[in-house]
Amino acid sequence: MIVAEPKPIKEILEMVRDLKKILIVGCKGCVTVCNVGGSKEVAILASTLRIAAKKNGKEIEIGEETLERQCDPEYIEEIKDIINDYDAVISIACGVGPQFLSERYPATRVFPGVNTRFMGGAIEHGIWSERCAGCGTCVVHYFGGLCPIARCSKSLLNGPCGGSNNGKCEISGDVDCIWDIIVRKMMEQGRLDELLEFKPPKSWMTARDGGPRTMTREELVK
Amino acid sequence: MSEYKSGSNLEKVLKAGHFAFTGECGPPQGANVEHLVEKAGHLKGYVDAVNVTDNQTAVVRMSSWAASLILLEQGLEPNFQMVCRDRNRLAIQSDILGVYSHGIRNMLCLSGDHQKFGNHPDAKNVFDIDSMQLIHTVKTMRDEGTFLNGQKIDVPPKLFIGAASNPFAEPFDFRVYRLAKKIAAGADFIQTQCIYNMDRFREFMKRAVDMGLHEKCYILAGVTPMKSVGMARYMAKQVPGMDVPDTLIKRLRSAGKGKIAAEGIQFAVEQIEEFKEMEGIAGVHLMAIEWEHRVPEIAEMAGVLPRPKV
Ligand code: SF4
Ligand code: SF4
């Protein structure tokens, strides 16, 4: 899923300082799963803003909506009748949400309420970890099913570097060296020869380096 | 066709079967040419080539190619270092052409320390290719005469290709294989990480020799003399992939006040003596960090003078 975390409340308060009518829009997709942008979080943010306004002696009106998904025009459409009642929207979906809203409702100011971090998953309750950098050409099968592009600090395809230390990456004792894990796994499985194969420079054309990406699947286009 | 791949002094020394002795010089954090010339001057006549570091530890310094050219003007042979952190394959290939055009003949290919360590931790890194692919790039340009895209190069650069090896990083069992991989990718010579744990290094070299790696590539053992107990402790704890045994720290400490640096040098000299005899070792790479002026005396004590003229 796409993993996000709440923006500091101070930052949000600063963004909407001069606004009186705000619609907070959540999303039932990834951000609900990672406890940052679902209906529960919409309610919490709404009451936080109300309390802050009250403390400052300001009048404020907050609307609350949580859409099925914010990365789908069909659901973005659902707020078309109410959106004009508000000065601005705070989207607490991933970075796709505020953009789909901005594109559909050009007259409305849209603020991001979360920081979108990465594609990954929960390795424990409350702990998320990156797994994929969306390079567009998946090659994890060469590396014991693990991705050095997203998970090695230097995206080495012929790792590990000389900084690998007790299973940890040179950048921090809190970061696993994925190459340590790859090498141990492959050696245990007797697949050393595969690791000894030189991996040539990767084409980053399918990654973000190739420019903003659009994908068309003809069979689905009506 | 020349019998040499690059014709660098380092290549000639190694090919003639001499025990090579290389030094290192970090460019200044500024445009202080005078200081660079002074530091490098200490090495002149005492080493076969001088490694010029490339924004080492991700701290901004004068570019390694520019500092290499200054050394060249001073009559020293540079070993131009390049990291993959700061350049993509376009910049890498054009810099290779550039340095070669100016007379640089040795190049050390590195991935580079992550910028998180350095003085611009907010920077975006590149890592378009890794050190293995960099070795392959220089080799392709030299031996195939083509760029990475297969396009022909109008006068290909002929560089003597160096790579690093850290025998002490984890996983230990894989390190010798990674060395083999670098050699297969095109490394002509290897400079190892600073060695302190001699037992572990002997084991590493034994494996390398068993695999015949020393016959395919010149392996230079990395030596950095310890200046103080503090430095030894720092290296042991703070520098990733560095293996400093307690016995060495103890040895330095028991040398007593005012004699620790001399003891550090003594240890380095003993190491060099052993490397001269060690099977598979073709030379020593002395990284006397900000201690360039001590290099002549270390070279003298280690009996590696005079440097051969080939
Ligand atoms: S190889 Fe590319 S697509 Fe596959 S997990 Fe890694 S970044 Fe994602
Ligand atoms: S220590 Fe491991 S994860 Fe970190 S940069 Fe080196 S190989 Fe990659």
Image: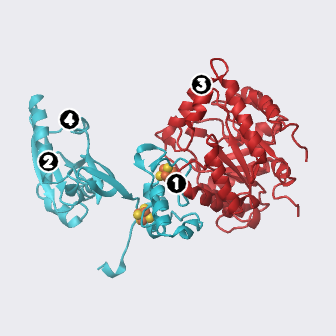
Chain colours: A cyan, B red
In what element is the residue under mark 4?
loop
Quick one: label 1 or label 3, which is nearer the N terminus?
1
Q: Which of B156 and B23 is in front in this view?
A: B23
Q: Do labels 2 and 1 share a chain?
A: no
State which quadrant residue A147 falls in. bottom left
Left-right relation of B270 to A131: right
Report the amino acid beneath label 4: Arg
Disc assigned to residue A17: 4
Quick one: label 4 or label 2, which is nearer the N terminus?
4
In front of the other: label 4 or label 2?
Answer: 4
Residue at image location 11% in from the left, 55% down from the top: A82
> Which residue is label 3 attached to?
B253
Report the amino acid beneath label 3: Arg
Residue at image location 69% in from the left, 33% down from the top: B267
> Which residue is label 2 attached to?
A86
Would residue B215 be seen by someone viewing this image from the given angle?
yes
Q: Do labels 4 and 2 share a chain?
A: yes
**Tag 1, which chain?**
B
Q: Nearer the viewer, residue A110 or B245?
A: B245
Residue at image location 52% in from the left, 44% down from the top: B114
Tell me the quarter of the image containing the N terminus of chain A: bottom left
In front of the other: label 4 or label 1?
Answer: 1
**Tag 2, which chain?**
A
Q: Position of residue B166 (x, y in %)?
A: 61, 49
In front of the other: label 2 or label 1?
Answer: 1
Q: Position of residue A129 (x, y in %)?
A: 33, 53
